[in-house]
Amino acid sequence: MTEFLETGESSLKGLNQARQWLAHTERLAVLTGAGISAESGVPTFRDGGTAFWSQFKPEDMASEKGFRRDPALVWRWYQYRRELIAAVQPNAAHLALASWAGQHPGRMTLITQNVDGLHERAGSPGVLNLHGELMKNRWLERGCGRCSMEEVVGAEPPRCAHCGNLLRPAVVWFGEALSPVVWNAAESAANTCELMLVVGTSGAVYPAAGLALRAKRNGAKVVIINPQPSELDEVGDVLLRGPAAMLLPALLAA
Ligand code: BV8
């Protein structure tokens, strides 16, 4: 593993090495985490004072058990995040990925742990949302067969007017399985890619973080972009220490 620090000529070496690999890559996989949205003003989960998990316990806020215990509290937290996301824009990192994908059709598979939808808003096609989508809802229970999002009562959270079934955010909570279709596509990309960019993730959450090791084991080069050390660093062939909104445009520029 080679560590290239953010400043000085060594980071240029790292960047040039990553650019060389990219130039010869037919199958690129990108795995992003909350850090890629940090420069859009979206708090991450585990780093810095504003990180979500420094204010709330994940099991209370991002689990079915926590939601059943206090549906109004969890619903309000997601509504707060929805309002925050609606008010921000994709940043240069999101846009650089979308632009590269547009110039190299079919060569990038973008896999994200984020639920903020900023990759889609930047124009990236076919995003694999491992952990679901914040702006969408789904029913908590199987329901009465007449549950319709047009016929709800109450607000925090809304519930089916016929059977009281609660609406919940269409995200994957801790302890919940990922969508098999999305996960299989992500695994397949990790199995077949020649290069994986791992951007803005602490590598703390599984099975998502395992995709980097899977890529490595299939013989791919792994480039990590993160201003801080992460749990995936030992998997990296090159570590680019710095913010995604600076490093991704530099790496992906034509
Ligand atoms: C499951 C949606 C099984 C909700 C989220 C071992 C193996 C498998 C599972 C487990 C295991 N051990 C424990 C588990 C269970 C658990 C887990 O992984 N727990 C962890 C905490 C130990 N996993 C699960 O429960 C998963 N499900 O395993 O199901 C199963 C199977 C069959 C049937 C039933 C069950 C589901 C996990 C999904 C949880 N949902 N999100 C929501 O968002 O509200 S996870 C949550 O964490 C977010 O999605 C987030 O994206 C994700 C990962 O965090 P990161 O993205 O990495 O964010 P973080 O803040 O940690 O790091 C940010 C990084 O950015 C930092 O490194 C920072 O330095 C960097 N950064 C900052 N600024 C910048 C930057 N980088 C670049 N540029 C910058 N400017």
Image (cartoon, grey):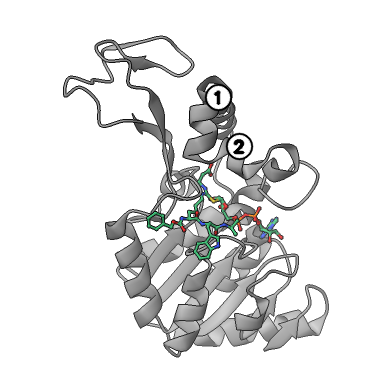
Question: Toward which corner of the image does residue 66 lie, by quadrant?
Answer: top right
Question: Toward which corner of the image does residue 125 lie, by quadrant?
Answer: bottom left
Q: Nearer the viewer, residue 154 or 99?
A: 154
Identify whether 147 is placed above or below 37.
Answer: above
Q: Tell me the number on the disc at residue 70.
A: 1
Q: Amino acid at mark 1?
A: Asp
Horizontal placement of 247 versus 193: left or right?
Answer: right
Does residue 71 appear anywhere in the picture? yes
Horizontal placement of 53 versus 6: left or right?
Answer: left
Quadrant containing the N terminus is bottom right
State yes or no: discs 2 and 1 in contact (Cβ < 8 Å).
Answer: yes
Secondary structure under tag 1 reads loop
Residue at 74 percent across and 83 percent down: it is 3
Secondary structure under tag 2 reads helix
The answer to which of marks 2 and 1 sits earlier in the sequence is 2
Does residue 107 appear anywhere in the picture? no
Q: Tell me the number on the disc at residue 146.
A: none
Q: Which residue is mark 2?
A: 60
Label 1 crowding class (10 Å Cα cut-off): few <14, some 14-19, many 20+? Answer: few
**Residue 60 place in picture, x, y as percent:** 60, 37
Residue at 39 percent across and 53 percent down: it is 177
Residue at 64 percent across and 61 percent down: it is 244
Identify whether 61 is placed above or below 20.
Answer: above
**Residue 94 place in picture, x, y as percent:** 52, 54
Q: Nearer the viewer, residue 245 or 70?
A: 70
Disc 1 C-beta below 8 A from ligand 1: no
Horizontal placement of 142 versus 51: left or right?
Answer: left
